[in-house]
Amino acid sequence: MGMSLGKRALAVSLGVVASLGFAAPVAAESAPNPPAVSTLEGVNDWSCKPTAEHPRPVVLVHGTWVGMVETWKELAPELVAEGYCVFALEYGNNANLVDGNVLEMLGGADIRESAVQLAGFVDKVRETTGSPQVDIVGHSQGGTMSRQYLRFDGGANLLDPSQNKVNRLVTLGATNHGTSFGDVQALGALAEALGVPVQPLAGMAVGPSYIQQMVGSPFLQILNAGGDTDRGIDYTVIASRNDKISTPPENTFLTAGPDATVDNIWVQDGCESNTTTHAELTSNPRAMYIVQAALDPTYAQRVEAPCKEG
């Protein structure tokens, strides 16, 4: 028996989503609240106390459809070895009939809801460690969602930046100004023109964050309406010219506004042979070096920058 028109449309939509090149869907095995423990050794150690050398805990924020263990299995141990208190959450797998994410994909929920989850997690880290501020490292949607948290959910204090809960945000291939997902956005537009409701069906299946990250989305228009940055925050924005997911890759770069600093960096700067992909931004030695140097400027004085291909 052939599929109904609705099932065929959903199949087409999921086919478009699958062609994005993200990792295979991750089944949600936990409640939407952040887990108390992690299988990443040394991460989410709630007894950890920051040192004078590294006074701010580091919060790692994964991207769309890929969990924290897969995302941070290389970087997290390096940060722990350097003496940081390192924390990571999983977010955005909640599903409901209104917003979608029927498959309960991690990072699939409305980015605004995920930012509220991040806000609660950061408050828990601050309270437990006794540190007034944290630094955040976000990959892909994780960087964009962190900016939502800064602007609208208490991460940055618009009236008094000295009260910011975040000192530095480091992003890796973040969809800050939207992505075309390679040519998928164009394919989706073509399918919509042919009468296949790709965006609504895909959003229902894997959650609205997929659509919210597209170039020109209403979500991104609101997020960026007041400028790219918030006062008192230092931003390091890392991109790869070989990124085929957050496209065009230069869309990730930010422009500094009042009382903020921005360092936009290609992993190919000083290492033209580097072929790091979107997913490899969290594990490539040069990308990880840039993260470490952003979190601690003395790191670059102690450690030579590697030049290795992705």
Image (spheres, rainbow, N blue to C red):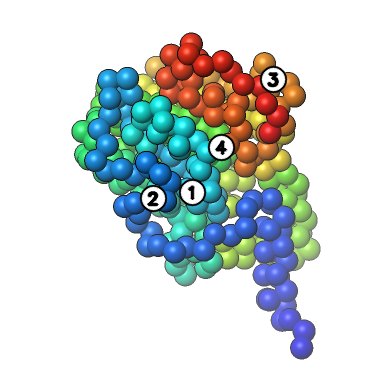
Q: Is residue 102 above or below residue 274?
A: below
Callout 4 amino acid: Thr
Residue 176 in percent (x, y) is at: 55, 36
Residue 42 in percent (x, y) is at: 37, 41
Callout 2 amino acid: Ser
Q: Is residue 285 above or below residue 302?
A: below
Which residue corresponds to the image point at 62% horizontal and 42% vertical from the top-left?
279
- Marks 1 and 2 sit apart, C-alpha to C-alpha, by 8 Å
Q: Which residue was labeled with disc 4?
A: 282
State the SS at label 1. helix
- Marks 3 and 4 sit apart, C-alpha to C-alpha, by 17 Å
Q: Is residue 2 above or below residue 69?
A: below
Q: Residue 271 got which mark? A: 3
- Contact flag, marks 3 and 1 (Cβ < 8 Å): no
1 or 2: tag closer to the N-terminus = 2
Q: Which residue was labeled with disc 1?
A: 69
Q: Which quadrant of the figure has residue 158? A: top left
- Marks 3 and 1 sit apart, C-alpha to C-alpha, by 28 Å
